Amino acid sequence: MNIDNFSDVIKYCRFCFMCRHLSGIGNVTFTEADTPRVRASMIYGATLRPETLTNEDLIRTMYRSDLSGACRRNCVHHFDEVGLTLAYRADIVEKDAAPEAIKAIAANLEGKPEWTVSGEGKVAYVADKYSIEAGSADAFAKLASGYQTVKDGCCGKGLYVLGFRAAAKNVAEKFVKVLADTKAETIVVSNPAIYDMLVNTCPELGIAVPAKVMHTTEYLAGVTGKNLGDIYYLESDFLRNYNNDYTFPKAVLKANGANLKPFGTNDEESYSCAEGAVVLDKIEPELIEKLAKYIEARADHPESDVIAVASPYTKVQLKKYTSLNVKTVEELLAGI
Ligand code: SF4
């Protein structure tokens, strides 16, 4: 089973409560089950009694993790509690034990339309639905020119996160083929989930990505001249916790006069509305609302603070559930 590759995580996390304060879902539900320690304990129990691996409560708990990676990043030994959760989900799918609601979400992702390509240039910009809805794609258009736009399809990350690895590979291969056919030398994405898909998940699935991949904040690193002032920047799970503290979002904000103010009670916690879980809003949307309200409650001046995000997903969720003044980094750079 896939979880067998995480025996060290199971062994160590089940006796450790050091990162419980960084458990996003645990912080809004006040349930011990939603921490790396108890998830590991439950998986350990299931290894002793394999018939309990498909227990309904266990499955539900493992599918509602926010997968922020905050616990793994701040763990002294960086135990991969995210990897254990993803491995369990893959095992459940391989046993055909995924709940029908999860299967329906996966089928919907798999059935998305094909990617379309428009424009010309040596850069391909991926305009997924979150980047369009959050305004990142329009802002990018104000800041860049001479690029191809790739839009409308599925990259496979949601399927991978749900445990449907074969389907994820199938969809990702098609996505990468579309990107390869553009002959672009650089692929630019606003959505950090797609960045992580191309940089980490595709190689893990054996798929070679044919060009350099950049988040928009890296591609736009040379933009200067704004005087942004006080900004509260909410980190992206994928860029910070999955990609070695990717530096470009904060760097380009600072280069444009941003005075980055500390948000919340610490700089370790995830304030992304479960960006790492990609599709938790389709599984248990009420949890996303709780996470958004949790973030809103930590704003110094909720009505006036400018909140910057590198993740269009996070902006969409915060706009849906709060009155916070949230802008993507691209919007701030474009003066929108
Ligand atoms: S990830 Fe690290 S800090 Fe968190 S429970 Fe596991 S061993 Fe403890």
Image (spheres, rainbow, N blue to C red):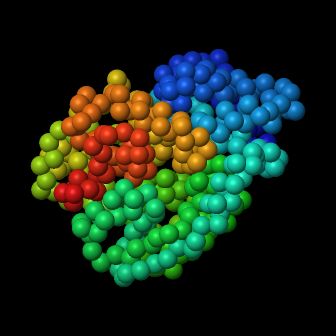
Q: Is residue 86 left or right of residue 67?
A: right
Measured along the vertical axis of the image, is residue 329 above or below residue 22? below
Give the residue at x 34% y 23%.
265
Which quadrant of the structure image shows residue 263?
A: top left
Image quadrant occupied by the C terminus: bottom left
For the question of whether residue 208 can be seen, the reply is: no
Please tell me how many numbered marks the rendered image carries: 0
The location of residue 6, given as percent across then percent down, is: 69, 35
Q: Is residue 46 left or right of residue 158?
A: right
Give the residue at x 61% y 49%.
161
The residue nearer to you, when weighing 28 against 245, is 28
The residue nearer to you, when weighing 291 against 205, is 291
Measured along the vertical axis of the image, is residue 165 above or below residue 144? above
Give the residue at x 53% y 56%.
197
Measured along the vertical axis of the image, is residue 261 above or below residue 238? above
Q: Is residue 66 left or right of residue 272?
A: right
Which quadrant of the structure image shows residue 301?
A: top left
Image quadrant occupied by the N terminus: top right
The location of residue 321, given as percent across then percent down, is: 41, 41
